[in-house]
Structure formats: structure tokens, C-alpha cells
Amino acid sequence: MTLAVFIFSRKALDFIRGSWYTVLAGKITKGTSDIYMNDLNIFLEHIYEASAQRGITPEQALLEAHAMGYSGLECDLWRLADRGNVKALFDGCSMRAASVYAFYDFPHDSAETSLEKMIAHLEAAAFFGADKVMAVPGFFQPGDDPEEVFSRCCGQLSVMCRRAQEYGITVTIEDFDDSSSPCCNISGMEQLLSGTPGLFCTFDTGNFAYMTESAEEAYSRLKQYIRHVHLKDRSRDVSRADSVHSNAKPDISGAEMYPCEAGSGYIGVESLVKRLLTDGYTGDFSVEHFGAVNQTEYMRRSAENVKKWISEVKNS
């Protein structure tokens, strides 16, 4: 396969699976069958969390996740350093890398340092067959000029998007739940996305809650950019805390939020998933609940819920 054909095929796949279009209320109809292409992913870190909690191997946890209905993994770049062995582990468990994320410091690093990180990120994603990457662009530091930070982030993200085209990879950012992030809220996301050609959105359903913003409003304003989705729910139920409350995260009002299964919290994840599907979203859903007190059970219940919602929309 030539490089040109490879790039075209990867771009075509991304268009088919990730682009927004509406055909018969979000369905692709072929003959009498409705085809839904939404793969279900889990964060690779959750595999390691489940493994440690239960004293089983990562391979066993991956096989269990696959049996639950997960087919892909949301991967932190550093976890993929031992490429050959990690790829063999994924392949042996019939799992793929769906997206690879990494942290940057675009506001403060030199262009050369950022480019070196970008290339390593994109090459790793390409090796594992991931068609999307997510860049966490960096954070404000005391004394930073906000407009300069946004300008530097847009500039470096533009470089990354151009480089990613060579690999047939889509670059995304997410609404990151830290007030020092330039993309912690809807307006910050809009500024970066509108200011960076070729940049798209990983829509995290639970992170707008950190800024006490509505995920439904965020969806309405950002949906043209959405190519990937993290399904994160939040709970106010203190019984979901671990023994030392290390999994509690206060929103900007000070109210604590706890991880929970998708569909078990106050975010309205079911409504968002069904709205996405009805509007024609054909990309992946990646379940996320860092800090779950029983990661395996949270994974299982989340998978059951998401599969049920997809089925309900498909059969409606």
C-alpha cells in the first residue's frame, strides 16, 4: 500500500466514522439493515486500576473488558513506550488503541520541544493504529497573558494538525477539568477550536460540570467539532468515595464530585448519548471513571448502560 493510499484510506475512515451527518435520523441504511458504527472503549488506566484492585494480570482485565463489550482503549502515551510488547498484549486480547492522549506545555515550551513531543505522539498513535490523538495543550501560570497563551496554543496545535495529516490522524482537545487550563470551559474550547484549522473536539460529558456549566449547552455549541466522546458521569453521593477521599474532586463552587458509572450520576449522560446518536454521531464512546472504588464493576455497569442506550436509539 502506498503512503498516498494509506493516508486517503485513513482519512476516509475518519470521515465515515467521525464526521457529522444525518441520514434517516442518524442511521446509515443499507437494504433493510440499520448500521451503527459506535465502538465502545475503556481507558487503559482503568485496566491497570482493575488489575491492581483485584490482584489479576492486565491481560486478564483486558479479556474481561472485551467480554463486557469494549473493543478499544483510550491510551496515555507513556503507557505505550514498550511498543512491541504492548501491541502484542492488545492484539492478544482483541483490543485496539482508539485514541492516544498526551500532555503538552504549548504556552511555555519552545517550538522545537513541542514539535519533538508531537512527532513522538503521532508516531506512537500510528504504530498502534489509532486514528485520533488528544493533546492537553498546557496550563496558565501566574503572570501569563491569557491572549498570548491562547495564541501560542493555537499556533502549536495548528502545527500538530498539519503534521497529523501525514499520518491520517485527527487531532482533538477536550474540556479539561482544571481552572488553569485554557480549555476548561465552553468559551475556551470555542476559542481554541475556531482558531485552529483542522482541530476537533473530544467531548467529555462530565468535565463541564467542574466549571458548573451545562453539558447540554456545551454540546449545542460544540457539536460541529465533535469527533470523539468521553462518557464521564459525576455523583454527589459520598458513599462512592474511597477510604481516604482521594477520588473526590470539588467543582469550582466547592461541591465534591465522585466517579460513578455512566448513567448513574447527575450529568445526564443517557440523554447526551441519545442526542449524539439521533444527530448522526458515528464515532466512538470511551467510558471514563478514574478513581472508581470497584473499577471492574463500574466498567461492567457502564458498558451495559451504553449498549442499552445505543440499542434503544437503533430500534426506535
Image (cartoon, helix red, strand yellow):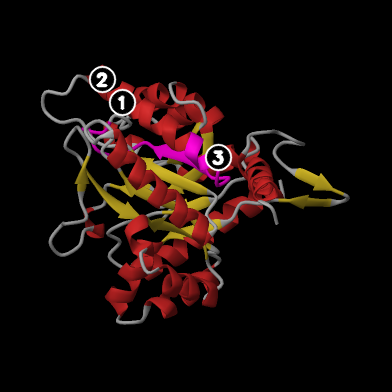
Given residues 86 and 266, the one toward you in this image is 86
Q: Residues within 10 Å of mark 3 (few under 14, many from 20)?
A: some
What amino acid is at disc 1? Arg
Asked whether the beta carbons under mark 1 and mark 3 sit within 8 Å of each other, the answer is: no
Task: Specify whether 27 is left or right of 39.
Answer: right
Q: Nearer the viewer, residue 83 or 215?
A: 83
Where's residue 244, x and y in %?
12, 61
Q: How far, Cα to Cα, is label 1 from label 3?
A: 20 Å
Select label 3 or label 2 by which is in front.
3
Label 1 sits on residue? 152
Start-end of magenta stretch: 162-181
Q: Amino acid at mark 2?
A: Glu
Amino acid on which disc 3 is placed:
Gln
Residue matched to label 3: 165
Write down the residue under mark 2. 148
Does residue 125 belong to the magenta stretch?
Answer: no
